[in-house]
Image (cartoon, rainbow, N blue to C red):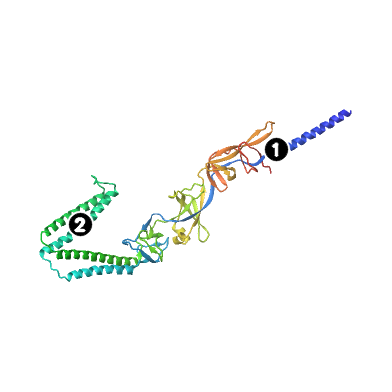
């Protein structure tokens, strides 16, 4: 009887031990297994409002330089316009003065007066030329001018030959080369004619005094004429830049002059966009993966705080490879924003409504792992252990990201029939055993 009681007690103790072992083994497995959230992916069209920063941009802007500067620079006194200003043809843009105008003018007048004084000194000698000497003087002037003209024409022709990479005249020359050659031929003919005339004049005996007189008179007359032309050109330029006006009507898109600064004529003084071509707000797309396109809804916040509806009208890439999107401006928006001058002074915030053209698989950003072209998710798979227990494992599955809008990512693969693991409480990898979070 006692042996039976001991057997029963042993069975009860054994059962308790087995139960405790099973309990603690389950507890250990629960503690050691990664916990994840599991979601069933949905399909839909990715949409998001993205805010970008842009600046005013004008199309077809044309730079304008101050012509006939002859190497002079300008001191800018005042500027009457700003970037964004609308101007009429003939409107004053800025006022200026030729740098060191008075000093330069005095120097050129001294050059003129010096040559003129030499001419008067020669005239006071009262040199009377015989008919043969007058003929020689005329021939001397012609041959001197013809020699200079021939040299200029020859240099111009040679320069054009080198520009076109030629060493001899081709059978069918370009228009520019043909014109340079024709001018050279004309000047060569004139030189030969002057040379023949000079040879005829040289048949007569011409004294050294007459030769010197004629040569000096020619030299100083050329110097006086050159100085006179420089003086007149400088005075005309000074008068022109006292008030520089717009050549055409349009919008000022950029200024190359600033009050109190010096303007170098190698640069454009201003840029003008023809009237009627309205500007846009150009926004840098930045790092967003959203695909911008023409026709997307957009809005700009007015100076009074409400949204002004508009749309995107174009996309492109800068020379540096940066993507941008252009947002349309109309006259009402420009007025509500305080005008083009106001828009040009700073950045403009633009909200663009993105909506994908087609439905795709949408996943939380936390569920899509990796970076660049190596993106993937962990798909949950059900199975049983060697002891017949149900268990969950994860499988690394590559995906192609189409776009991301905030915390939502659109992928190309159809995962609507799968379950995806994310928000794990510890690191997991391909093949890891997981457990689902329970509330």
Q: Residue at x 48, y 52 (%)?
A: 284
Q: Is residue 390 left or right of residue 341?
A: right
Depth check, front residue: 84 or 214: 214
Residue 349: tell me if it is visible: yes
- Residue mark closest to the camera, 2 vs 1: 2
Q: In which quarter of the image is residue 99?
A: bottom left
Could you tell me which secondary element the residue under label 1 belongs to? helix
Q: Residue 154, relative to residue 41: is it above or below?
A: below
Q: Give the left or right position of residue 432, taking residue 136 as reference.
A: right
Residue, disc 1: 29
Q: Please state which of residues 370 and 15 is positioned toward the viewer in this rendering.
A: 370
> Where is residue 302 drawn, in percent x and y?
50, 59
Q: Residue 98 appears in which quarter of the rendering?
A: bottom left
CA gap, disc 2 to disc 1? 107 Å
Q: Which residue is drawn at 20% across and 55% down?
A: 187
| Mark 2, residue position | 147
Quarter of the image for the N terminus: give it.
top right
Q: Where does residue 388 sit, x and y in percent of width and height?
A: 69, 31
Q: How crowded is mark 2: few (under 14 residues within 10 Å), some or many (20 or more)?
A: some
Whether residue 92 is visible to the viewer of this picture, yes or no, is: no
């Amino acid at each position: 009887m006692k042996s039976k009681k001991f057997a029963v007690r042993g069975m009860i103790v054994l059962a308790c031990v087995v139960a405790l072992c099973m309990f603690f083994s389950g507890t250990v497995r629960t503690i050691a297994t990664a916990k994840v959230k599991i979601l069933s992916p949905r399909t839909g069209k990715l949409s998001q409002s993205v805010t970008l920063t842009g600046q005013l941009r004008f199309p077809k802007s044309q730079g304008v330089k101050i012509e006939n500067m002859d190497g002079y620079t300008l001191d800018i006194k005042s500027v009457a316009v700003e970037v964004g200003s609308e101007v009429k043809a003939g409107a004053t843009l800025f006022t200026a003065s030729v740098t060191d105008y008075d000093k330069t003018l005095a120097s050129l007048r001294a050059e003129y007066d010096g040559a003129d004084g030499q001419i008067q000194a020669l005239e006071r000698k009262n040199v009377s030329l015989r008919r043969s000497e007058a003929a020689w003087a005329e021939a001397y002037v012609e041959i001197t001018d013809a020699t200079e003209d021939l040299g200029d024409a020859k240099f111009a022709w040679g320069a054009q030959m080198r520009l076109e990479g030629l060493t001899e005249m081709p059978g069918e020359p370009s228009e520019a080369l043909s014109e340079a050659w024709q001018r050279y031929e004309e000047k060569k003919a004139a030189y030969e004619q002057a040379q023949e005339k000079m040879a005829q004049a040289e048949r007569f005996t011409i004294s050294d005094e007459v030769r010197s007189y004629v040569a000096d008179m020619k030299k100083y007359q050329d110097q006086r004429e050159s100085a006179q032309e420089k003086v007149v050109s400088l005075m005309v330029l000074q008068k022109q830049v006292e008030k520089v006006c717009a050549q055409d009507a349009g919008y000022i898109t950029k200024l190359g002059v600033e009050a109190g600064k010096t303007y170098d004529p190698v640069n454009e003084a201003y840029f003008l966009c023809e009237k009627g071509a309205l500007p846009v707000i150009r926004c840098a797309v930045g790092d967003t993966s959203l695909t911008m396109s023409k026709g997307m809804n957009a809005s700009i916040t007015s100076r009074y705080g409400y949204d002004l509806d508009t749309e995107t009208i174009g996309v492109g890439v800068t020379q540096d490879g940066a993507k941008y999107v252009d947002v349309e401006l109309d006259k009402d928006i420009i007025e509500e924003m305080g005008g083009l001058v106001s828009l040009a002074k700073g950045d403009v915030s633009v909200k663009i409504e993105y909506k994908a053209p087609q439905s795709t698989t949408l996943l939380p950003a936390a569920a899509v792992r990796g970076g660049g072209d190596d993106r993937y998710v962990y798909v949950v798979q059900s199975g049983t252990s060697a002891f017949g227990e149900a268990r969950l494992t994860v499988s690394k599955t590559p995906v192609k990201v189409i776009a991301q809008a905030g915390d939502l990512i659109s992928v190309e693969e159809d995962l609507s029939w799968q379950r995806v693991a994310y928000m794990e409480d510890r690191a997991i990898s391909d093949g890891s055993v997981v457990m689902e979070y329970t509330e």
